[in-house]
Image (cartoon, helix red, strand yellow):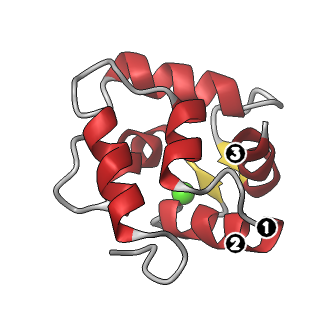
Amino acid sequence: MAFKGMLKDEDVAAALQAFAAADSFNHKQFFAKVGLAGKSDEDLKKAFYLVDQDKSGFIEEEELKLFLQTFSAGARALTDTETKAFLAAGDVDGDGMIGVDEFVTLVKA
Ligand SMILES: [Ca+2]
């Protein structure tokens, strides 16, 4: 998995299991369960660039939709409702994308 060495496999599995049902995703609880909430800014920046699959410097809506698959290829895509709620929570400046600083702030919130 993409986060090997940063996160524990069992934490990732448990976090994905906890939000396996459609429309059950809660980013705050997910970040805590998966072990990202306690990571350093440096690690969170690394995590950001894993989610930013096209390396544009922003997490766009399409990448956010596939957020869980960054943790495990077999994970589900977020629903449109979950994606929009996640984006709204992280997109402080309202440009429709999540930048690296916005991501770090969101995870630590
Ligand atoms: Ca991107």
In this orientation, which residue lies closer to the viewer: 39 or 47?
Answer: 39
Tell me where residue 51 appears, x and y as whole percent: 50, 60
Query: Looking at the image, is 100 positioned above or below residue 68?
Result: below
Tell me where residue 57 appears, x and y as whole percent: 67, 63
Q: Secondary structure at mark 2?
A: helix
Within-10-Å neighbours for mark 1: few <14, some 14–19, many 20+: few
Left or right, 49 with reference to 100: left
Left or right, 59 with reference to 108: left
Q: Earlier in the sequence, mark 1 or mark 3?
A: 1
Any part of residue 90 in sight: yes
Q: Amino acid at mark 1?
A: Ser
Q: Residue at x 22, y 50 (%)?
A: 75
Give the residue pinned by disc 1: 40
In this orientation, which residue lies closer to the viewer: 79 or 109?
Answer: 109
Q: Residue at x 16, y 56 (%)?
A: 74
Tell me where residue 1 appears, x and y as whole percent: 32, 75
Within-10-Å neighbours for mark 3: few <14, some 14–19, many 20+: many
Give the residue pinned by disc 2: 43
Q: Amino acid at mark 3?
A: Val
Q: Amino acid at mark 2?
A: Asp
